[in-house]
């Protein structure tokens, strides 16, 4: 009898033990990840007041590790020190690194690039040209020892004027010490807005496109897995586009919107639409401030959309950098970009704002990447003419 009671007691005790919750202190401790970044590379990564880390790369890396049981430590450095400390293991991860054969021997890289880094030339708007070959023989400022200086040297024919910093090189253009500045597109736009250089714009054609990756210390395979998993989640959830728009896409003022919509509506009058009987006009606003219009053109074999016509006219005029586009019927109602339009626009940048009207009277400006979640990637690395 006693044995039976003892067995029953032990059974109850074991059942109670299975219900005991393990204290938080015994849960898996978060992984400490040290993120080293270039503190002088706005808008990708830089420091605000009191050393606060901000920028596209900073927001992206935080989003990547969010919810992955990670304690993220940010460490601002100059770029040369980032490379050394990532190699030695003093930091675990960094962003904005171009992948080369030599670097692939030293670091591990994310499966997907975080974005394309566009290298461009900028001139005073009255002196703007459509193609970089027209600037051969001119004085061009650039940060001394930078990747952009090597790009200029490879291109050849430029009178290169190196400066200590990107800021100094941009000011040289503002003071007319040079005819052009060479640097990363996004950083140039950031400084041009900060210093209120309203009459400087990008040359039409690109110098180079280089993909930027997340780089991880070679001994931190677990962290690399977390980077790849987190980046896939951030893109799929739409968080990537939110971060991209925050840092790289200038919002339109009401005056810009009205001008764009008025031009598109008026352009519809010239449409040649004998088959669809639906006249459509479009207008595209460039980063240099110009507006180009187009209308749909239909033949028995081909239909060219109004948006495509407007873009083609802009490109023929040496404009490749677009802020926003709208297509309208003559009565002013918004015509959403077609699937072909969306892919065509994406070729010129994921951040182009396109007008849509999901509900009557509810007009929104949406990034083309949000309208085209699975674009055909061109692999465009930029082009030049010898």
Image (cartoon, grey):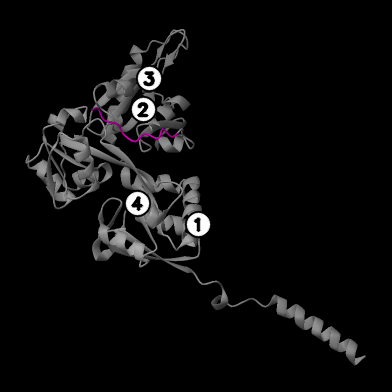
Which tag is nearer the camera, tag 1 or tag 2?
1
Q: Give the structural element (helix, strand or loop) at label 4.
A: helix
- Within 10 Å of disc 1 (Cα), the crowding (few <14, some 14-19, many 20+) is few
Nearer-N-terminus badge (2/4): 4
Residue 225's disc is 1
> What is the distance, in whole Å, between disc 1 and disc 2 at their CAs?
41 Å
> What is the distance, in whole Å, between disc 3 and disc 1 at their CAs?
45 Å
The magenta-colored residue range is 377-386
In the image, residue 382 lies in the stretch drawn in magenta? yes
The residue that disc 3 covers is 306
Relative to 345, residue 52 above or below: below
Q: Is residue 162 left or right of residue 100?
A: left
Magenta span main SS = loop
> What is the distance, in whole Å, between disc 2 and disc 4 at their CAs?
45 Å
Nearer-N-terminus badge (1/2): 1
Nearer-N-terminus badge (1/4): 4
> What is the distance, in whole Å, between disc 3 and disc 4 at their CAs?
47 Å
Q: Is residue 109 left or right of residue 82?
A: right
Residue 102's disc is 4
- Within 10 Å of disc 3 (Cα), the crowding (few <14, some 14-19, many 20+) is many
> What is the distance, in whole Å, between disc 2 and disc 3 at their CAs?
9 Å
In the image, residue 373 lies in the stretch drawn in magenta? no
């Amino acid at each position: 009898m006693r044995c039976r009671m003892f067995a029953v007691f032990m059974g109850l005790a074991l059942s109670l033990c299975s219900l005991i919750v393990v204290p938080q202190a015994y849960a898996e401790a978060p992984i400490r990840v040290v993120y080293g970044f270039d503190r002088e590379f706005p808008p990708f990564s830089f420091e605000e007041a009191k050393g606060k880390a901000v920028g596209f790369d900073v927001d992206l890396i935080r989003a990547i590790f969010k919810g992955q049981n990670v304690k993220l430590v940010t460490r601002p450095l100059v770029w040369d020190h980032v490379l050394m400390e990532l190699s030695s293991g003093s930091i675990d991860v960094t962003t904005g690194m171009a992948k080369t054969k030599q670097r692939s021997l030293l670091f591990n890289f994310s499966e997907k690039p975080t974005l394309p880094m566009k290298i461009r030339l900028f001139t005073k708007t009255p002196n703007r040209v459509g193609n970089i070959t027209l600037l051969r023989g001119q004085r061009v400022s650039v940060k001394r020892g930078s990747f952009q200086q090597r790009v200029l040297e490879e291109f050849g024919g430029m009178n290169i004027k190196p400066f200590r910093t990107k800021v100094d090189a941009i000011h040289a253009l503002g003071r007319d010490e040079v005819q052009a500045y060479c640097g990363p597109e996004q950083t140039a736009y950031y400084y041009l807005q900060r210093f209120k250089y309203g009459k400087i714009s990008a040359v039409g054609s690109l110098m180079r496109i280089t993909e930027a990756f997340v780089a991880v210390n070679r001994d931190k395979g677990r962290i690399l897995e977390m980077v790849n998993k987190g980046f896939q989640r951030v893109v799929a959830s739409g968080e990537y586009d939110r971060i991209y728009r925050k840092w790289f896409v200038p919002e339109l003022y009401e005056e810009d919107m009205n001008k764009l919509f008025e031009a598109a509506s008026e352009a519809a009058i010239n449409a040649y639409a004998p088959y669809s009987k639906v006249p459509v006009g479009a207008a595209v606003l460039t980063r240099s401030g110009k507006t180009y219009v187009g209308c749909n053109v239909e033949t028995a074999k081909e239909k060219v959309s109004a948006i495509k016509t407007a873009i083609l006219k802009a490109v023929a005029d040496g404009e490749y950098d677009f802020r926003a586009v709208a297509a309208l019927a003559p009565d002013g109602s918004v015509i959403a970009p077609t699937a072909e339009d969306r892919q065509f626009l994406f070729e010129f940048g994921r951040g182009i704002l396109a007008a849509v009207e999901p509900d009557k009277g509810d007009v929104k400006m949406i990034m083309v990447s949000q309208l085209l979640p699975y674009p055909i990637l061109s692999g465009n690395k930029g082009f030049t003419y010898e």
